[in-house]
Amino acid sequence: MRRSLTVSLVVIILGALLVLGATLASGNSPQLGLDLQGGASVVLQPKNKVPSGTLDQAISIIRSRVDALGVAEPDISRQGDSIIVQLPGVKNKDRALEIVGQTAQLYFRPVVQALPPEGATPTTVPPTTQPGSPPTSAPAPTDVPTTPSDQDDPAAQVVLPQKDSKGRVTTRYALGPAAVKGQAISSAKAVVDPNSGGWSVNFSLSGDGEKDWNTMAAKVGVKGQIAIDLDGVVKSAPALQTTNFQGSGTITGNFTEGEAKDLALVLSYGSLPVQLVPQTVQTVSASLGKDSLHAGLVAGIVGLGLVALYMLLYYRALGLVVWFGLALSGAYMYAIVTYLGQNYGLALSLSGAVGIIVSVGVTVDSYVVYFERLKDEIRSGKTVRSSVDRGFARAYRTILAADAASFIGAVVLYLLSVGSVRGFAFFLGLSTLLDVFIAYFYTRPMVVLLGRNRFFTETRWVGVARGLASPQAAAPPAKVPA
């Protein structure tokens, strides 16, 4: 039996050293949440009442967009009719938040005529290339009103602006009804044009989309312009070089790298099925995140140190068992959290850190339950050696019951809550499971082996038997009046 206990103890200690060593050697570390590394968050709410399934579809599209933005460990959840998006570590917060909530109603419209901005000096516009309309070189009217973005009806003729990178209207287009919608695009990618060196967008068409696109191209004709209407703004109005698209094409224009990538992103992941309105937008600076992380680490270390000191003074050599046990739990927890972060997107937030710190109390309680059971056995006249196994068998049932209650509470809290509360619940539940594992495979064999060593049982200041049987140790702590 002693050999099996020794093997169990060696395996769990070596296992902790191996997983921790492998984690550190890989250079990986736990992924930090928004409140620990900075970033941005936004609460989005539909403009009108929509079915639950529509919101779920919107969340799926937002998640695809966020993944394409390269944001590490985003947290996208639903709370009632609201969608909460947290983007930890995002660099360009404004661009990310704009892409996330963009409704992105995308239409492809034939260009009827180019118009100057409203209020500009009348100029002569180039002849229109729209089939069925006679070429004209007459001054373009500047008092033709621009169609509001919320009145961008795909079945109607509209006048929409084209803007530069600073949001200024450079020109406007009179556009015919939308011949093709954004769903015709199955995928898109921003690329550098090898001829011009500028940015363009390559796109692929779906089966039905290819048919609709070729029908539109045949009506417009070669050199005819097709405007890309995105949420009531013309992103580009390229001239057609062919009327026969065989499943793919290229959109060219004076795109910057960011504009090309943003357009490709929206084309790739479709339009949201509902118009979302930002309710609250929050940004957390990286320095504030570092301050929160530093404060959390200091609080955790101080609390852990005080607990460890108390256990050593109260239980003597058994306090060292607690120390090593907490170290093992910490090693396994660090490795598990790092692994889940790298492979499954788990982010350690401040609330999650709180859950881990609270779980220290759960872990220490397991040791206290076992040690107090040993006390009862020794007081009844038994030796430490004969008490450790019997005491653990009885204490472990209590430990399982307590941990089960804690785990059930964590699961219920995780399932019924959102956001940071879920992070607290997850890490509390994970720590509780780890406590059951450590108690059986480390605490039991360690105490049993120590119970057979006279140095740890009889030495004046270290002795386990003296510590457990002494009146000072046996006396319950004084109660503080409420």
Image: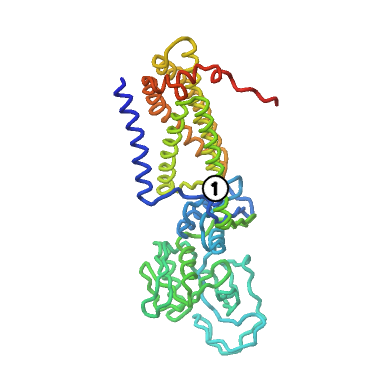
Q: What is the number of callouts on the image?
A: 1
Is 115 placed left or right of 319 in the picture?
right
For mark 1, what is the residue?
A: 77
Vertical order, 227 against 302 (above or below): below
Q: Nearer the viewer, residue 200 or 420?
A: 420
Q: Nearer the viewer, residue 121 or 139?
A: 121
Residue 102 percent across, percent down from the top left:
56, 61
Vertical order, 466 against 283 (above or below): above
Q: Residue at x 50, y 76 (%)?
A: 237
Is 22 placed left or right of 37 in the picture?
left
Residue 308 percent across, percent down from the top left:
51, 33
Element assignment for label 1: strand
Placement of the N terminus among the 4 image quadrants = top left
Residue 243 percent across, percent down from the top left:
40, 75
**Way the structure is coloured:** rainbow
Q: Residue at x 55, y 55 (%)?
A: 38
Residue lying farthest to the front in this orientation: 460
Vertical order, 301 against 435 (above or below): below
Residue 407 percent across, percent down from the top left:
50, 31
Q: Nearer the viewer, residue 464 or 370?
A: 464
Q: Residue at x 41, y 38 (%)?
A: 332
Q: Amino acid at mark 1?
A: Ser
Residue lying farthest to the top in this orientation: 381
Whether residue 418 is visible: no
Q: Nearer the viewer, residue 394 or 98?
A: 394
Q: Quadrant of residue 245?
A: bottom left
Is 24 placed left or right of 407 in the picture?
left
Label 1 Cα crowd, 10 Å radius (few <14 / some 14-19 / many 20+): some
Whether residue 320 is visible: yes
Placement of the C terminus among the 4 image quadrants = top right
